[in-house]
Image (cartoon, rainbow, N blue to C red):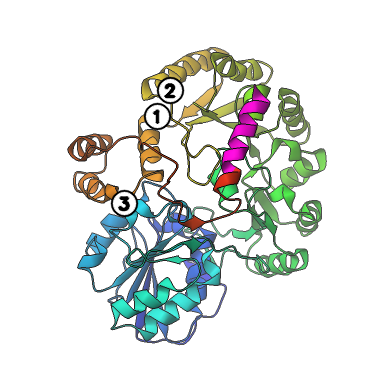
Amino acid sequence: MGEKLLYKPGGGGDFNIWMGFPGNHSFALSSPGYLWLCKMIDEMDGVNLERFCTDRQPKNAPNLVGFSFTFDNDFLTIFEMLQKNKLALKADERATLVFAGGPVVTTNPMPYVDFFDFFIIGDGEDVIEKIVEICRQGVNDKENTLKTLSELEGVFVPKYPKPVKKLTSRLEHCVYTPILSDEAFFANTFIVELSRGCANRCAFCIASYINLPLRCAPFDELMKTVEFGLKHTDKIALLGAQVSAHPRFMDILRYIDKRGAKMSISSLRVDAIEPEVVQILARAGQKSVTLAIEAGTDRLRKRINKNLTDEQILQAVQICRDNGLSGIKFYAMLGLPGETQEDIEGFLTLAKKMRNVSFGFSTFVPKPHTPFQSCNRAEVKELEDKINYLKKEFHKLGIKTSFSSPKWDYWQSVLSRGDSDLGEFLVEVYKNGGKLGAFNAAAKKYNIGSPNLTDNLPWDFIQMPPGKEFLKSEFKRLLQEAD
């Protein structure tokens, strides 16, 4: 099948734009946010868009290059893609403008200011066409182009620093997968964004806080979009950090169910598990579900603002079992602030009351713009001891587990809360292969470690609701309520 465009490209031109995805083509084709911006650019007259990734190279010399920056370690792949296409890593060594957008740089672009000429802070769909037009008009005048870009709301130009207000789209339209392909990771699947953000605001959760307020796509627009997708495929996937928060969630499920389409949802909140929801998903072909419980006890879940009880979790599992979903995976975290051995034992207590489930664990990484942004992270050795203990105990119960690497998570925490002094460190890590050894060696060379945060944070110039003072008060509230 190859690729099927669900839109009409605009007229060709001589202004060449590369849009980069730091991964392979299969994953790029299953990334609706990245593809949506590509669609918007490709529909413009006078521009020539080329998508490129680790296994797909562009052909024409670029006038503008953009990157999706979703994960902290993406910088390694982005650097590789720049050099492979004969573009200098550092902005002041290039004539071509290179920018980035996505969760990593929306929360804290400071570690990367040496490498990108500008950043999109927040939802890019409201500003991408203006950016392209400004760059097209100033194609041979880099300095004036950057000055003009710095005046746009939601655009941060390191050369002209100033406070930047995060862009927040009203989501009056539906974002969906504008390209279908059998080569996509989710092959021939029409992904529709139901909502953006999450009203529950778990204290560690960057996806919740940087996307406030919770917004839901209009129901009528969603139905039109689903019908449009069903003309091209019978696979529908519903996207959103909190899809069940859509005020017409059940109506959406029932509509797709009546159309007889295959349907999937990446995850559901435990308190959104109801018999009819599970029955519809099972009929639509979904066989498993991921439930995020985060912590092992009611006390610690309350502390992180994940207000779920063991009783609710067990009830949700029973509903899934009774109504056709056989595969249940729990997502949880280790090393959350205030975690005790009792909280670790809580996972095992839960597991003993269930059968045929699996657990996936990551370790807590403090993130900017969350109530836990200034929290210390547990030592690697302490986390490894907890992991080894749980591996042994879960094995006794016959329950499968997976764990993220505390050592890699440590470096994620350094990158996510870093400042502009990380530039040479990042280059050193990249040049030496990007493995853990490269991080450790570069850290010794440039004296890089866990950030020593004060009240002045590197990302304070980004104006983002609910604001710094609220985050401080929320942190205090959660500590007091959990004690």
Q: Pick the residue in front: 13 or 217.
A: 217
Q: Is residue 86 visible?
A: no
132 above or below 435? below
Report the span colored magenta.
471-483
Earlier sequence position, callout 1 versus callout 2: 2
Q: Position of residue 266 (x, y in %)?
A: 61, 46
User: Tag on residue 420?
Assistant: 3
* SS for callout 1: helix
Mark 1 and mark 2 residues within 8 Å of each other at the beta carbon: yes
* Residue at position x 44%, y 82% in the image: 133
User: Tag on residue 406?
Assistant: 1
Task: Tell me the CA gap for discs 3 and 1.
Answer: 24 Å
Name the residue carrying label 2. 383
Dot 1 amino acid type? Pro
Does residue 418 belong to the magenta stretch? no
Q: Pick the residue in front: 14 or 147.
A: 147
Does residue 478 belong to the magenta stretch? yes
Dot 3 amino acid type? Ser
Earlier sequence position, callout 3 versus callout 1: 1
